[in-house]
Image (cartoon, grey):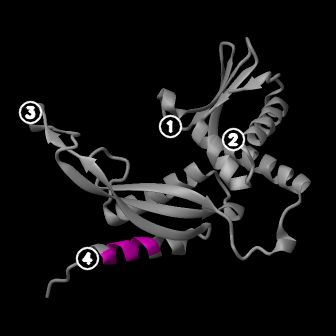
Amino acid sequence: MKYIITENRINNLIERFILERYPMVKRVTFSTMAKAYTWGYNNDKVTSEENPIRKNVITVELISGKLTHSPSYTLKKIRNDINPMFGLDIGKQDSDWGIDYKNVFDESITLKQIIKENKLNDFITQYLDSWLSTKHSYDYDQFIIIENLFEEDYDSIIMEHDNSDGRLWFDKNFRKNLSDLFNKSAEEINHFIKEWFEHKFGVEVKYVD
């Protein structure tokens, strides 16, 4: 007798696999998005709006207070676990699967457990220190650069300090993640990152870009 594994069944298996192994994941959801192909040279597939194909996207909700590493590091670890288990090939160009995350707070936290502002600042500092330990930071000419490990393109750079003018640039997606995670405005995050970076690297940050 042959057993047919339906899409819902695969989704349920993936969800249970992630939830059982990652206590910092609150919920796993599935959605689809359009990816498109058309035929190019040598019958290679290239994107086109005229021939859409659906792509499955796994979204994991990461509980902010339970993360031991950065969200991107945790997501990569989850991806590397489920790829061989379910044959998803996430990260490859022709894969029918993708993965994403969003930060959430644990709803079981009571008002008495809300961190006061000074404690929150200490927590953010600890979070950034832990995040930095998973990245590659180095000096290059007048620059201090922080980038993702094992990536060698410009998109891997997350922070860059220019000692010639005191400018600190950091990735807007990372800024938004911090803002959402700690319920602070972009301006507050900029100010906090400025002070953290100055203390961490012993340089002056004149403005944040």
Sooner in the amino-acid sequence: mark 3 or mark 1: 3
Q: CA distance from mark 2 to mark 1?
A: 15 Å
Q: Amino acid at mark 1?
A: Phe
Sooner in the amino-acid sequence: mark 3 or mark 4: 4
Compared to residue 170, the image places residue 27 above or below, namely: below
Q: CA distance from mark 3 to mark 2?
A: 44 Å
Sooner in the amino-acid sequence: mark 4 or mark 2: 4
Q: CA distance from mark 4 to mark 2?
A: 41 Å
Q: CA distance from mark 3 to mark 4?
A: 34 Å
Q: Amino acid at mark 3?
A: Asn
Residue where numbered disc 4 is placed? 6
Residue where numbered disc 1 is placed? 150
Q: Residue furthest bottom?
A: 1
Residue where numbered disc 2 is placed? 132
Q: Secondary structure at mark 1?
A: loop
- At a point 72% along the width and 63% down the height, the residue shown is 65
Mark 4 or mark 2, which is nearer to you? 4
Crowdedness of circle 4 by 10 Å Cα count: few (<14), some, many (20+)? few
Q: Secondary structure at mark 2?
A: helix
Mark 3 or mark 1, which is nearer to you? 3
Residue stretch rendered in magenta on the structure: 8-15
